[in-house]
């Protein structure tokens, strides 16, 4: 399990207001990048994209994460829900790099390089992989139980 450094966590927390303001723009830009892979795109309910429902859910999850990165126990029910949807849709560890490679550039695109500096993106990279490892571990457990 990877954990973000205290320094990275502090940076992520300071970006919460910008994420709150621009979250939907960021996740909409993220999905645009992510769906360049047709295989990944096929995993998603496109109606939930077009209605804006899924970008909204992901933006909410990212904001909750930014705010609670130093008290992850607050995220329990939200994590359970993500794991459930991921297992229903067949999300596996090998998919997580696609989301990282879509999300981090989307943060820079929307916030701009002055706000989303290399240091900020580095901190978000650490934060992303900390959450990804939590999800992957819980999902692996759920897949094993279902077997
Ligand atoms: C740290 C990374 C991730 C976070 C924070 C995240 C977050 C979420 C959230 C909040 C939901 C909505 C849950 C609900 O229905 O309430 C969701 C659903 C989903 N996620 Fe993720 N996710 C991550 C990684 C991934 C990856 C790597 C994939 C695969 C490419 C993926 C594919 C999906 C799919 C297919 C759904 C269901 C969407 C639908 O109904 O169309 N997610 N995720």
Image (cartoon, helix red, strand yellow):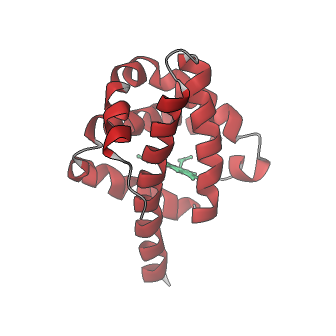
- In the depicted structure, whether residue 59 falls above or below residue 22: below
Total numbered labels: 0
Residue 92 visible, this angle: no
The quadrant in which the N terminus is found is: bottom left
Rendered image quadrant of residue 21 = top left
Q: Position of residue 14 (x, y in %)?
A: 33, 25
Q: Residue furthest bottom?
A: 147
Given residues 4 and 46, the one toward you in this image is 4
Q: Is residue 136 visible?
A: yes
Q: Quadrant of residue 94?
A: bottom right
The relative height of residue 74 versus residue 13 in the rendered view (above or below) is below
Horizontal and vertical percent position of residue 128 = 47, 46
- Is residue 141 or residue 51 the one in the foreground? 141
Q: With 91 as the anchor, is 141 left or right in this view? A: left
Q: Residue at x 42, y 45 (%)?
A: 127
Compared to residue 68, the image places residue 23 above or below, namely above
Where is residue 13 shown, x and y percent of the image?
31, 31
Please report the residue visible at 46 percent of the width from the left and 46 percent of the height from the top. 126
Rendered view: 93 above or below 129:
below
Residue plotted at (54% across, 21% down): 25
Residue 137 location (% of width, % of height): 43, 68
- Asked if residue 100 lies left or right of residue 14, the reply is right
């Amino acid at each position: 399990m990877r954990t973000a450094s205290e320094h990275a966590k502090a940076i992520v927390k300071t970006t919460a207001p910008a994420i709150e303001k621009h979250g939907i723009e960021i996740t909409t830009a993220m999905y645009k990048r992510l769906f360049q892979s047709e295989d990944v795109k096929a995993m998603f309910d496109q109606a939930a994209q077009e209605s804006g429902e899924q970008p909204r859910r992901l933006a909410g999850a990212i904001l909750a994460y930014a705010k609670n990165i130093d008290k992850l126990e607050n995220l329990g029910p939200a994590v359970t829900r993500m794991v459930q949807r991921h297992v229903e849709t067949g999300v596996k560890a090998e998919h997580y790099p696609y989301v990282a490679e879509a999300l981090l550039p989307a943060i820079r695109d929307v916030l701009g390089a002055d706000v989303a500096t290399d240091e900020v993106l580095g901190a978000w990279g650490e934060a992303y992989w900390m959450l990804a490892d939590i999800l992957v571990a819980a999902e692996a457990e759920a897949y094993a139980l279902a077997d």
